[in-house]
Image (cartoon, helix red, strand yellow):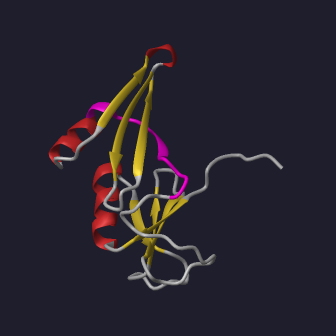
């Protein structure tokens, strides 16, 4: 077996609408109802490849595998989640327009610029821009 890519992350949220708005407005992801689920309890967020890269569950609802998670708290051993992105300048404009605090890092040797921002659930996102 070989891992081909990261399929999705799952975020437990207390505020579905706020979390959806954050990802739609900032990253351009599209929210859709999860298959065979109540839309008030589950939403999937799709990227430009039509892949559901984020699964949102309303906190306190059932999960496939039970695990204690506290939205806004620490995310266990996961430090951050990274996305490969396009449009660095546009993303900076979006972050500033929303008055979001963000960090910046650059690794010139591999032509990589990174932006770091936390979502409404305290999940740290790393946004990678190459070239």
Number of callouts in the render? Answer: 0
Task: Say which of 22 and 49 sits in front.
Answer: 22
Q: Is residue 19 magenta?
A: no
Q: Nearer the viewer, residue 117 or 79?
A: 79
Among the 4 quarters of the image, the one containing residue 18? bottom left
Queried whether the magenta region covers residue 86, the answer comes back as yes
State which region is magenta: 76-89
Q: Residue at x 71, y 46 (%)?
A: 4
Q: Position of residue 78 (x, y in %)?
A: 53, 51
Q: Is residue 73 left or right of residue 120?
A: right
Q: Residue at x 50, y 75 (%)?
A: 34
Compared to residue 33, the image places residue 100 above or below, namely: above
Which of the image's four quarters has the C terminus?
A: top left
Return the x and y of residue 32 as percentages of the image width and height. Answer: 43, 70
Q: Residue at x 33, y 45 (%)?
A: 117
- Residue, x 47% and y 58% (percent of image)? 75
Identify which residue, 28 or 104, lies in the foreground: 104
Of the pair 107 and 2, the residue shown nearer to us: 107
The outermost residue toward the top is 109
Q: Height in image: 32 above or below 51?
A: below
**6 sits to left or right of 131:** right
Residue 106 is situated, as x and y percent measured from the top left of the image, at 40, 23
Q: Residue 68 at what x, y percent from top left? A: 52, 73
Which residue is the extreme one toward the right? 1
Residue 50 relative to residue 4: left or right:
left
């Amino acid at each position: 077996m070989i891992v081909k890519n990261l399929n999705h992350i799952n975020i437990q949220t207390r505020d579905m609408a706020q979390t959806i708005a954050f990802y739609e407005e900032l990253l351009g992801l599209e929210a859709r109802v999860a298959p065979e689920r109540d839309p008030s309890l589950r939403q999937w967020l799709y990227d430009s490849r039509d892949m559901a890269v984020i699964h949102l569950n309303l906190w306190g609802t059932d999960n496939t595998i039970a695990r204690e998670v506290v939205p806004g708290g620490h995310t266990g051993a996961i430090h951050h989640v990274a996305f490969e992105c396009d449009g660095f300048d546009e993303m900076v404009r979006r972050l500033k327009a929303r008055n979001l605090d963000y960090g910046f890092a650059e690794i010139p040797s591999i032509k990589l610029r990174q932006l770091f921002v936390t979502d409404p659930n305290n999940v740290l996102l790393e946004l990678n821009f190459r070239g």
